[in-house]
Amino acid sequence: QKEVEQNSGPLSVPEGAIASLNCTYSDRGSQSFFWYRQYSGKSPELIMFIYSNGDKEDGRFTAQLNKASQYVSLLIRDSQPSDSATYLCAPGPSGGSYIPTFGRGTSLIVHP
Amino acid sequence: NAGVTQTPKFQVLKTGQSMTLQCAQDMNHNSMYWYRQDPGMGLRLIYYSASEGTTDKGEVPNGYNVSRLNKREFSLRLESAAPSQTSVYFCASSSQGNYGYTFGSGTRLTVV
């Protein structure tokens, strides 16, 4: 089973700052990762997918994957109070039977 | 609207009672999953169905049974509810490949 570790937080940042969320993983075979956002009392929603080393940008969000160091990160630029949520990372399929495993998530609080 | 529909949204059971949580998706996804989410524990996989006609145990299957009724529907049954099964239950579905998961809105279950 693929293990992923996340700091539970909470991570508190001021509005307008860059929020940096990190996830480390144990399976060197993991080729891709998903980032999900979960608002309190709601279900997770997919916000980013990255499958190669380097950066992937989508609006204010940038996902970074470093396979050599086995970590994946999510940067949120110009953080807004509406970004306050728990962020979950999960490895994507890497061949064979795929059993999705999620990190426990990092709670992000963006204060005005 | 396309997506994953879970019923019921809320349920209170007495210890020893049984119930079935229903899940249906209309996205023609092959794979479906049942997770439970508890504070501090993240999302834990109970059972999954990689394709119609197959089901497999996840991380925490004890006390649960599942049925993949057809490609659209995947139900979760608690035969004899216990207070330890108090949780939020999420159903999710995915297609093959790196497309992530779509989650239902969840069922908040309390066992007293």
Image: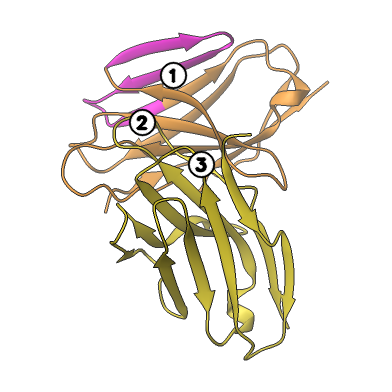
Chain colours: A orange, B yellow
Badge 2: how crowded within 10 Å, few (<14), some, or many (20+)?
many
Residue B1 quadrant: top right
Subunit under mark 3: B
Q: What is the magenta range?
A: A53-72
Within the magenta stretch, is there residue A63? yes
Subunit under mark 1: A
Residue at the spot x=69%, y=25% of the render?
Answer: A83
Q: Residue furthest front?
A: B70
Name the main secondary structure of what is drawn in magenta: strand
Within the magenta stretch, is there residue A68? yes
Badge 1: how crowded within 10 Å, few (<14), some, or many (20+)?
many
In primary-sequence order, the first of circles 1 and 2 is 2
Residue A101 on image: x %, y % = 38, 49
Quick one: SS at disc 3? Answer: loop
Q: Vertically, is A48 above or below A30? A: above
Image depth: mark 2 or mark 3 in front? 3
Give the residue at mark 1.
A63
Q: Are marks 2 and 3 on the same chain?
A: no
Q: Which mark is residue A33?
A: 2
Task: Give the residue type at disc 2.
Answer: Phe
Residue A108 quadrant: top right
The answer to whether residue B45 of the structure is visible from this angle is: yes
Q: Vertically, is B34 above or below A53? A: below
Task: Give the residue type at disc 1.
Answer: Ala
Q: In this rendered view, identify the residue nearer to me: A6 or A41.
A: A41
Horizontal arrangement in the rendering, residue B40 relative to residue A53 (left or right) = right
Subunit under mark 2: A
Residue A8 on image: x %, y % = 56, 45
Q: Which mark is residue B26?
A: 3
